[in-house]
Image (cartoon, helix red, strand yellow):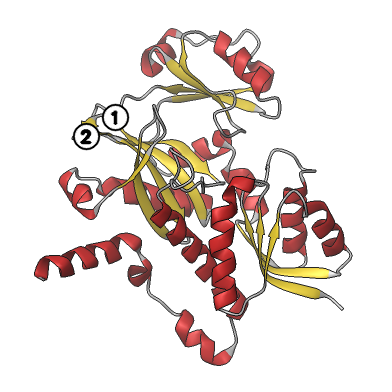
Amino acid sequence: MTETYDIVLATPFPNYNFFAHKLRELCGQNNLTFFLCNDSWVNEFLKKLEARQIAARVVLDLTANQTLDDDPYVVLAREVKRQGGYVIDDPDLTREAAHKGILHRRLVENGIPVPETVVVPRSEIEGFKLDDETKARIGLPYVVKPSWGDSGVGVEVNAMSEDALLWSASQAPNADSFLIQQKLEPRELGDHVGWFRLFHICREVIPCWWNPYNHEYQMVTPGEIKQYHLGPLRRIMRGLARISQMKKFTSEICLHRDGKFYAVDYVNADPDMNPRSFYANGVPDEIVRHIVWLLFYEAMHIVKRGHGYFDDELRESEADRNWLVRRQREQAAMEIR
C-alpha cells in the first residue's frame, strides 16, 4: 500500500528549521500530512518514491541544485512530477529560469529593464576581449558572474579586465556561460539605498529594502512606496514572473543613479528563508511566516481541489491575497481610528 504525503518540504538546509516548523504547524492545523525531506532522508525518500511505496501530492522544492542532473533533490522533484504530483516550482521551468544567460535574452526581448550585458560562452572565454564600443557602454569596473550559480560563487563585482572571466570560470565549473554586466550605483533614498530584494510568492510581490553591502533586509512600507515612487518594482516583478513562469523566487532590483529601475539578479529560484530572529542578516520573521502561509495555501489548494464543499473556501481574488493591498487597507483603517 502506498503512503501518500500531502505536502513535502525538500531542502538540504538545516537553518530552514523555522520555516519547516511553521509549515508543519499549518499542516497539522488543517489535517494535512507533512514530511520534511532533508539530507538525512532524501535518498531513502527517493528510493521509496521510485518503488511507489510512498507518494507526494505537492513538493515545495527549496534549494534543488539545478546544475547537477544527479542531485537527489532534482531527481526527487522530477520523479514526483513524473508520477503526477505537483512541484513548486516545476523542475524543468526552474532549470531554465535559473540560467541567467538564457533568461537575460528573454528579458531583453520582453522589454524588462536590465543592465548593459554581454553573455560569453565558456568556449570563448580564453582570449576574449571587449571591443571599445562595448567597454564604453558597460563602463569600468564591471560585474562578472556565471550563468549558473548562487550564493555569490564566481561573482566579481569590481572587475577591471577580462581576466575576471577566467577566475569566474574556475569558481563555477558547471556554468556554460558568463555575464559581463554594467555595475549599477544605487540612489540614496532617505536612510536607504535604492537596492531592493523582492519576493514573488504565488502571484504576490513582497518588497524589501536590501543593503548590497551588509545584506540586511528591511520591509518596504506602503508609505515608502508612495513617497519614493516605487511602483515600477511591482511591474518588473510581475514581468519576471510572467516570463519565467515561476511561482516562488526573489530578484534584486536597483534604482540606479540615472533614475531608472533595473533587474539585477533576475530569478533566484531558492529564496532566502533564514529568519532575522536567528540570523543578523536574515529575512524579517513576519515575512518568513507570511511566505510559509502563501506556499501552504497554494499547496492546500492543490491537495484539496475537487473536494466539494471545500472549494468555495479556496476561491480568493488576487487583490485580497495581495500583501501590499492588505497592508494599505490596515494602514487606512488605523488612520480612520
Q: Dot 2 corresponds to which residue?
A: 191
Mark 1 residue type: His
Q: Is residue 283 left or right of residue 54?
A: left
Q: Is residue 164 left or right of residue 229?
A: right
Mark 2 residue type: Asp
Figure check: 162 above or below 51: above
**Residue at (66% x, 25% y) in the render:** 172
Callout 2 environment at 10 Å: few (<14), some (14 to 19), or many (20+)?
Answer: few
**SS assignment at label 1:** loop
**Residue at (29% x, 29% y) in the render:** 256
Closest to the observer, 273 or 204: 273
Residue furthest left in the image: 336
**Residue at (23% x, 54% y) in the render:** 222
**Residue at (86% x, 70% y) in the render:** 53
Residue 19 x %, y %: 54, 56
Per the rendering, the mark at residue 256 is 1
Residue furthest bottom in the image: 309
Residue 64 x %, y %: 67, 47
